[in-house]
């Protein structure tokens, strides 16, 4: 840290004043002691007897103190040097602290991109580093808060848009019936049926939105039980078999062990598989493949794949974003809410696992890595 000319002048002036005061103090003490010795012959004789044997140095070159004043002055000079040095260092640190406080006030005024640039010594440097780290942490927290606000605004905008479209259709068709703008019962049935389908679409969106907001909360409790994932995907394949047959599709399961056991919330995990299989039925080709296997004793892999059209590479990392659609028109036709994969990812996260997608010309696969045991539950039991 560089001192200004004024600060250098203040530091020099304080040093001069300290030296002058110390010299005056030394002179005063010397005069008082000298007067005391001169007025007391016994004290003067005792001092003479003490100083005579005192000598320093080898042989003929030894030094003898012929006067108590010389010894006193030497001691006081050493003490004075130490006191002046201490005073100047103390004043220098006060100047440093003043600069640090000024920089801190400057940052507090809203200049959050500014950092204290000083390179100091000792504890003061640790203070500067702590302040800079605190400002960085505050900026990060503010940015995260702004991101959360933007995320909330985006969520509200998307939900409003997706609800407004079917709601407009419902109001429009019911308005035609209300105003008797139909020519036959067949028209009335057509209008009410369309309104009913749009209402169901709204219901799906609201339910998905509720489920998404619920599983996004990190404190969401999991009803953990031991489940056989292989058996679960086989049951799900059987439940979707009729729908798959209607679409001319076939569901195949593959389990690499007699049992693929893990600790999980079976209801929430089933929701993940339901969402992935439903997506495969909407966008897949002729086959859906469900696989479950052990990676090791601590982790299992579950895969939901289909032979539908390849997903572009630039879209793979966005698939799990809320309301993201690779092909918006197709999703609207199938009635998707755009929240299914986001819900799946949130539930997998709750189980301390992770999910990703890979796609090529042959298969599009959603792969989940899930722990056999929930670590946080074990830690909780250990703490108790």
Image (spheres, rainbow, N blue to C red):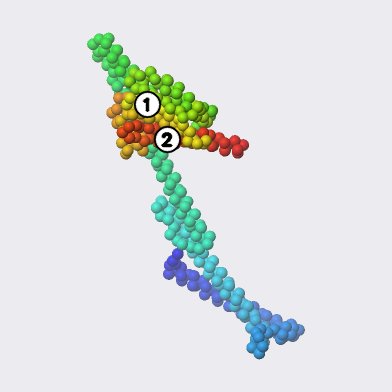
- Under circle 1, the secondary element is strand
**Residue drawn at the location 57% of the way across and 75% of the way down:** 81
Name the outermost residue toward the bottom: 60
Q: Is residue 270 above or below residue 47?
A: above
Nearest the eye: 61 or 32: 61
**Residue drawn at the location 42% of the way across and 23% of the way down:** 237
Image coordinates of residue 298 in percent, x first then y, are: 51, 36
Residue to which mark 2 is pinned? 355
Q: Is residue 122 visible?
A: yes
Question: Where, by quadrant of the figure, is residue 377 drawn?
Answer: top right
Image coordinates of residue 61 in percent, x first then y, are: 64, 88
Nearest the eye: 225 or 318: 225
Q: Between tags 2 and 1, which lies in front?
A: 1
Q: Is residue 273 visible?
A: no
Image coordinates of residue 166 in percent, x first then y, are: 32, 23
Q: Quadrant of the N terminus?
A: bottom left
**Whole-number angstrom distance, CA of label 2 to CA of label 1:** 18 Å
Image coordinates of residue 5 in percent, x first then y, are: 43, 69
Question: Where, by quadrant of the figure, is residue 275 drawn?
Answer: top left
Horizontal side of 59 relative to 124 (left or right) equals: right
Residue to which mark 1 is pinned? 288
- Under circle 2, the secondary element is strand
Question: Where, by quadrant of the figure, is residue 340 drawn?
Answer: top left
Name the outermost residue toward the top: 185
């Amino acid at each position: 840290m560089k001192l200004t000319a004024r600060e250098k002048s203040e530091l020099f002036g304080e040093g001069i004043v300290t030296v002058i005061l110390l010299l005056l103090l030394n002179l005063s003490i010397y005069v008082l002691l000298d007067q005391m010795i001169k007025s007391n012959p016994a004290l003067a004789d005792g001092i003479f007897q003490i100083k005579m044997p005192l000598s320093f140095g080898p042989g003929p070159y030894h030094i003898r103190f012929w006067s108590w004043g010389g010894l006193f002055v030497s001691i006081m000079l050493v003490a004075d040097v130490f006191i002046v040095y201490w005073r100047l260092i103390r004043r220098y640190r006060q100047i440093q602290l003043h600069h640090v406080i000024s920089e801190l006030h400057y940052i507090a005024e809203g200049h959050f991109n500014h950092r204290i640039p000083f390179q100091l010594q000792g504890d003061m440097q640790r203070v500067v580093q702590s302040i800079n780290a605190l400002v960085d942490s505050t900026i990060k927290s503010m940015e995260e808060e702004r991101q959360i606000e933007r995320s909330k605004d985006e969520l509200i905008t998307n939900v409003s848009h997706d609800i407004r479209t079917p709601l407009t259709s419902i109001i429009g068709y019911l308005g035609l019936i209300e105003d008797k703008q139909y020519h036959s019962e067949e028209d009335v049935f057509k209008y009410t049926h369309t309104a009913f389908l749009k209402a169901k679409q709204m219901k799906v969106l609201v339910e998905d939105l509720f489920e998404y907001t619920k599983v996004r909360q990190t404190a969401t409790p999991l009803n953990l039980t031991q489940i056989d994932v292989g058996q679960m995907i086989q049951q799900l394949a059987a439940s979707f078999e009729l729908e798959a047959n209607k679409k001319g599709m076939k569901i195949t399961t593959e389990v690499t062990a007699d049992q693929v056991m893990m600790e999980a919330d079976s209801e929430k995990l089933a929701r993940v598989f339901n969402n992935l299989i439903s997506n495969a039925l909407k966008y897949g080709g002729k086959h859906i493949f469900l696989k479950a296997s052990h990676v090791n004793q601590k982790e299992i892999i579950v895969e939901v794949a289909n032979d539908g059209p390849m997903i572009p590479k630039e879209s793979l990392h966005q698939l799990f974003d809320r309301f993201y659609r690779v092909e918006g028109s197709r999703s609207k036709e199938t009635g998707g809410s755009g929240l299914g994969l986001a819900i799946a990812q949130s539930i997998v996260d709750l189980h301390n696992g992770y999910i990703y997608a890979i796609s090529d010309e042959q298969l599009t696969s959603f792969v989940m890595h899930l722990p056999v045991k929930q670590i946080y539950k074990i830690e909780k039991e250990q703490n108790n």
